[in-house]
Image (spheres, grey):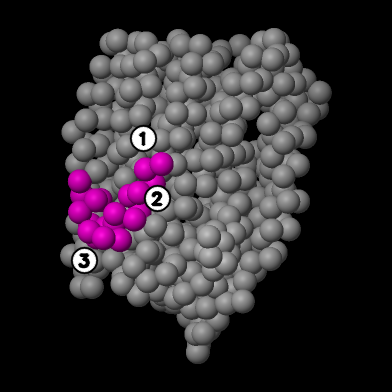
């Protein structure tokens, strides 16, 4: 392997390391939702307790637009490298707080409040983390390979899902149920806290991208906001595109363990095995989709897979709930993974291309965070929809609606002049 390629791989790993930490901690909320509910949000009604947990999870997403509007312009002004270090520090504070706060039985109402603060800090940081990473990867990509490079932003999250699900699977087999409820569920959160110093060290070694460094004019915060809000149709179109990604992602990953246990009544181990398989499937398909989008364009892939979602998601889930087995759940979730990964592999890089370059981080982050505010609420929305309708396949309606948003946004944005094809030029490697 050439020295240049080795350095490129190392750079991608440094950039995406924070994505790993973010999704690792987010996903643990899904795996241990029932245990977190009992620890911090105890209630005689399990539904109320679980909903309180999912709502605290969703609260972090409400902070994302605020983080995007605060940190996005900051990164567009001072640089990608410094911004990614700032987001990591804030994210680490939230992760450590959630890992170590005592339960409701020990400190009372302060327990759920501290967990909520931790989630808000994580959401504030995450509001620009994905945008910062995606923009950095797009600006360091070699010509004609931007989709492939940017796809590793999402691929790094899948590694976190696989690792988190594997830890959950091992804990489920090594500890008794009561031990997991009492303290075992905290182990993966402790592990996440311990890897923070390592991620901080490797991120500090990042270099600024050449494209940003060679700009002759660095816009002021006022100029960034003026450009950002002057392009509000692009931002709203981006929200629609991202809706498909965020809803499908959280349904097939974070929601899967709870869906498998509480709705389908499969074992926790079976639900976690399905989740690991989904993470592996996503990891394989995302770079492939990104690379194919470099060859045939983003638009064709986005349209194809939004249509597939609209036509097949609810029927697939209806078939699953009528024929519940581990194998059937695995099959359906892998199909949804295929749809998600191909769409997202083209969507993320497309969003970096349609947003004006001077507000690339802020515009991307704002669109992504606004969509994620709804998409991240998929756990609560799905739980509520099933409770109200009595239809165990009701999450399929929600994902189908998100796909319609993605389809409409794609048609709108790609009608714009110059947006019908992926960019063919890109800056080379980061400046050393």
Query: Position of 382 compared to 162: left or right?
Result: left
Q: Is residue 6 visible?
A: yes
Residue on which disc 2 sits? 287
Residue in the image at 46% along x and 35% along y: 279
Residue 1, magenta (yes or no): no
Mark linked to residue 303: none
Which residue is at the far right?
Answer: 106
How far apart are the alpha carbons under marks 2 and 3? 21 Å
Gap in angstroms between the C-alphas marked 3 and 1: 26 Å
Q: Residue furthest bottom?
A: 216
Q: Is residue 299 magenta?
A: yes
Residue 73 in view of the camera: no
Identify which residue is drawn at 53% across, 36% down. 161
Disc 3 designates what residue? 420
Dot 2: what SS?
helix
Local packing at callout 3 (Cα closer than 10 Å; few below 14, some 14-19, many 20+) is some
First reached walking from the N terminus: tag 2 or tag 3? 2
Q: Of marks 3 and 1, which one's residue comes earlier in the chain?
A: 1
Of the pair 83 and 147, the residue shown nearer to us:
147
The extreme front residue here reads 1
Magenta residues span 284-304
The spot of residue 413 in percent (x, y) is 25, 62
Residue position marked by numbered label 1 in the rendering? 337
Q: Nearer the viewer, mark 1 or mark 2?
A: 2
Taking 80 as reference, is 210 above or below it? below
Figure quadrant of the C terminus: bottom right
Please give left or right for residue 318 compared with residue 275 in the image: left
Give the main secondary structure of the magenta stretch: helix
Q: In the image, residue 260 lies at what x, y percent?
A: 45, 18
Q: CA distance from mark 1 to mark 2?
A: 13 Å
Crowding at mark 2 (Cα within 10 Å: few <14, some 14-19, many 20+): many
Confirm or deny contact between disc 1 and disc 2 (CB under 8 A).
Answer: no
């Amino acid at each position: 392997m050439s020295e240049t390629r080795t350095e490129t791989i190392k750079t991608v790993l440094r950039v995406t390391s924070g994505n790993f930490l973010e999704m690792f901690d987010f996903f643990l909320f899904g795996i241990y939702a029932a245990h977190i509910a009992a620890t911090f949000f105890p209630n005689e009604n399990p539904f109320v307790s679980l909903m309180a947990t999912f709502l605290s999870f969703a609260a972090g997403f409400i902070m994302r637009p605020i983080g995007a509007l605060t940190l996005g312009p900051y990164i567009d002004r001072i640089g990608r490298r410094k911004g990614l270090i700032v987001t990591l520090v804030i994210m680490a504070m939230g992760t450590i707080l959630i890992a170590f706060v005592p339960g409701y039985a020990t400190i009372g109402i302060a327990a759920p409040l501290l967990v909520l603060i931790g989630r808000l800090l994580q959401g504030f940081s995450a509001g620009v983390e994905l945008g910062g990473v995606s923009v950095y990867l797009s600006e360091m990509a070699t010509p004609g390979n931007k989709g492939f490079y940017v796809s590793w932003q999402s691929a790094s999250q899948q590694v976190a899902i696989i690792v988190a699900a594997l830890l959950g699977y091992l804990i489920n087999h090594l500890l008794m149920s009561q031990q997991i409820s009492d303290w075992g569920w905290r182990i993966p959160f402790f592990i996440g806290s311990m890897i923070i110093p390592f991620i901080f060290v490797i991120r500090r070694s990042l270099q600024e991208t050449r494209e940003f460094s060679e700009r002759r004019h660095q816009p002021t915060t006022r100029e960034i906001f003026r450009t950002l809000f002057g392009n509000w149709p692009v931002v709203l179109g981006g929200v629609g595109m991202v809706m498909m990604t965020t809803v499908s992602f959280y349904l097939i990953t974070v929601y899967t363990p709870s869906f498998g246990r509480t709705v389908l009544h499969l074992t926790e181990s079976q639900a976690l095995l399905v989740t690991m398989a989904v993470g592996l499937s996503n990891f394989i398909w995302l770079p492939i989709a990104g690379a194919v989008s470099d060859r045939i364009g983003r638009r064709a892939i986005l349209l194809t897979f939004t249509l597939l979602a609209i036509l097949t998601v609810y029927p697939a889930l209806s078939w699953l709930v009528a024929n519940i087995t581990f194998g059937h759940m695995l099959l359906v979730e892998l199909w949804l993974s295929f749809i998600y990964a191909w769409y997202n592999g083209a969507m993320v890089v497309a969003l970096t291309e349609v947003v004006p370059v001077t507000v690339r981080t802020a515009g991307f982050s704002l669109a992504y965070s606004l969509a994620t505010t709804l998409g991240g609420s998929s756990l609560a929305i799905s739980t509520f929809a099933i409770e109200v309708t009595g239809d165990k396949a009701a999450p399929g309606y929600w994902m189908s609606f998100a796909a319609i948003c993605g389809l409409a946004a794609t048609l709108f944005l790609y009608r714009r002049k110059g947006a019908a094809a992926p960019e063919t030029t890109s800056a080379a490697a980061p400046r050393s």
